[in-house]
Image (cartoon, helix red, strand yellow):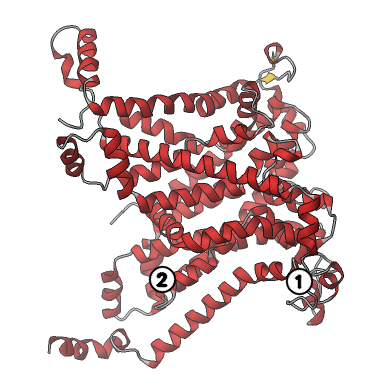
Amino acid sequence: MTTANTTGSQGQSGSRLRGAVAAVRWASRKPQFWFGASIILPTLIWYWMFSFRPILNALRLAVVQYRVLNPAASKFVGMDNFLQLFEHPLFFISVRNTLLWAALAFVFILPLSIFIATCLANVRRGRNTYQAIIFVPVVVSLVAVSLLFRMLMDPEVGMFNQILRALHLPESRWLAGTSSALPTIVAVGSWKGLGFYVVILTAGILHIPEELYDAALVDGASEWQRFWRITLPLLGHTLLLVTVLLAIGTLQEFTFPFVMTRGGPGDATYVYNMLIYSEAFEDLRFGTATAAALLQFGLILFISLVQIRLLRPRWSY
Amino acid sequence: MAASEEIELVSPLQGSKYRPSPRRLVGQAILHLILLAMSFVSVTPFVWMVFASFKHFQELVRSTALLPQVWTLENYIEIIGRVNFPAAFSNSTLQATSVTLCSALTSAALGFIFAKYRFWGKEKLFTLLLSTMMIPFAVVLVPLYITIADLKMSNHLSGIIVTGLWSSFGLFLMRQFMESIPSELLDAARIDGASEWRIFFTLVLPMATSALAALIVFIFLFNWDNFLWPLVVLNSPEKQTLPLVLAGLRSLYWTRYEMWAAGSMLTVVPVMVIYIFASKYFIRGLAMTGLKA
């Protein structure tokens, strides 16, 4: 009674309109109504202005040739923006780089974060301290990290190559080499993001009921078996979350390549979001940029759904 | 008695569970070694950066020693004089704090309403609001920019503040948390004659402190660090936020790394100070979200 705002059972007798009016009148006498309305109303206005309307506008922008100076005169061009996009010299390169980025990030982050999370879950003392330290790169500004690693990886005077030189090991061109740039930049990104996934996975592992491990222990299961037969399968929901977040994040990478390499050397680290950015704000082709973004949305949605389909566990506890 | 019997029973299989055996100790030692190595990898680059910011250029590029031979503050003095760091700092602070406070408040109020009120279309509305989280930012990048330009907010700090006043992620997090507040408590307060506003501010908000702290740290760091949206909205140097100014150092100082280090320090230190005090909330909040999502 105290938490009901409006009610659905009012319209049984009389016309529906009269029922609705009565319901509103009844509801507006409740203190909750005014509190709720004064929060929900601005919320709806804000969401309309800065979320729903831009999304709807994106659908419109993608099919017109947008005229920046006179938007009303924008011409409907149908699928032309998409066709123009496919003809962009950097389109396929950026798609390839982005997919490669995501794949490399999976390889770098997933096994290592599961490994570190397992260590964290099993260590008896200092778990919180270790977690807090491993999390540090996550909170430090992306731009600062980008600059920091550009300094460390300078082929001539950078710390990395100076150490390799001192150890008489072959040096690397790091970000300056055409073939080494992408793996290097993904490695830096993974280094920064690792702590995030470690924290989620550690929480997931610690959430697994202790009794299962005790039972396995009594049955004489080795640590290796316990990891593969209990931890990994029961981590299903968390692993799904991590892989989806990882895919969504890496397919939208922008700041790292933009600050660290500007997509170079050549176009070795030119990713899809840089294409969208330069289409929109360097070439002022708003239509093509938005078409590109919608295409990206489609791909991300598709990949997430595939992941959920393939990885979603059919149980819960 | 019972306990000792249990040990007798189990020890043939796996005694290590109950008594720290040498094998167990070695195992723990290996875990510590791995985690120490990982911690080392996580922080060493920053430690290097801290010292690099106090070095002269010549020393920075020649020696591999971690500590500076000659300590200097010149880098900081030069960078503050040449680049408008104080302005960028106040822009960033103003933007991040106003967005954080406002969206934390709206998230908490909405979380409370969606968790504890019943009204027509509630679940549908909730799904609708949350579904916006799925849309990549690139999709709304251009239309949102057009909106901001139409409102005459481009190249103005308000342009990056107004877009952050609500947060779907915050709404999700706060609703999850508010579900656990007992409705009886709210009803008791209502019977005592407390208004909904009073209940929200004096009962609900204090009970949600831990979730709210996590959310505040999340949103603050995200905004402090945000790059793409400010890059699009803010053009003139005196309006820019710290990440933009910092990224600009790359072309301004080409390869004068000691300046990069000093500039990065100015950006990173405030965040690190907050992190040192709030890391507990942050990690707990993230772990909680991960388990519930």
Query: Mark 1 near mark 2, Cβ–Cβ under 8 Å?
Result: no
**Amino acid, disc 2:** Ala
Circles 1 and 2 on the same chain: yes
Q: Position of residue A35 (x, y in %)?
A: 31, 29
Say the numbered circle drawn on residue B26.
none
- Kindly identify the residue that appears in the image at 39 percent across and 24 percent down: A41
Q: Is residue B200 above or below residue B62?
A: above
The one nearer the camera, A73 or B88, is B88
- Of the image marks 1 and 2, the number of the one nearer the N terminus: 2
**Amino acid, disc 1:** Phe
Q: Position of residue A156 (x, y in %)?
A: 86, 68
The one nearer the camera, B131 or B197, is B197
For this view, does B168 lie left or right of residue B157? Answer: left
Q: Is residue A313 visible to us here?
A: no
Residue marked by disc 1: A160
The local secondary structure at tag 2 comes to helix
| Chain letter belonging to callout 2 | A
- Kindly identify the residue that appears in the image at 70 percent across and 67 percent down: B49
Q: Is residue B198 above or below residue A310?
A: above
| Chain letter belonging to callout 1 | A
For this view, does B274 lie left or right of residue B90? Answer: left
The one nearer the camera, B33 or A136, is A136
- Kindly identify the residue that appears in the image at 72 percent across and 44 percent down: A94
Q: Position of residue A150 (x, y in %)?
A: 76, 60
Q: Position of residue B105 (x, y in %)?
A: 41, 39
Crowding around mark 1 (Cα neighbors within 10 Å: few <14, some 14 to 19, many 20+) is many
Distance from Cα at disc 1 to Cα at disc 2: 32 Å
Residue marked by disc 2: A121
Crowding around mark 2 (Cα neighbors within 10 Å: few <14, some 14 to 19, many 20+) is some
For this view, does B171 lie left or right of residue A295? Answer: left
The local secondary structure at tag 1 comes to helix
For this view, does B218 lie left or right of residue B263? Answer: left
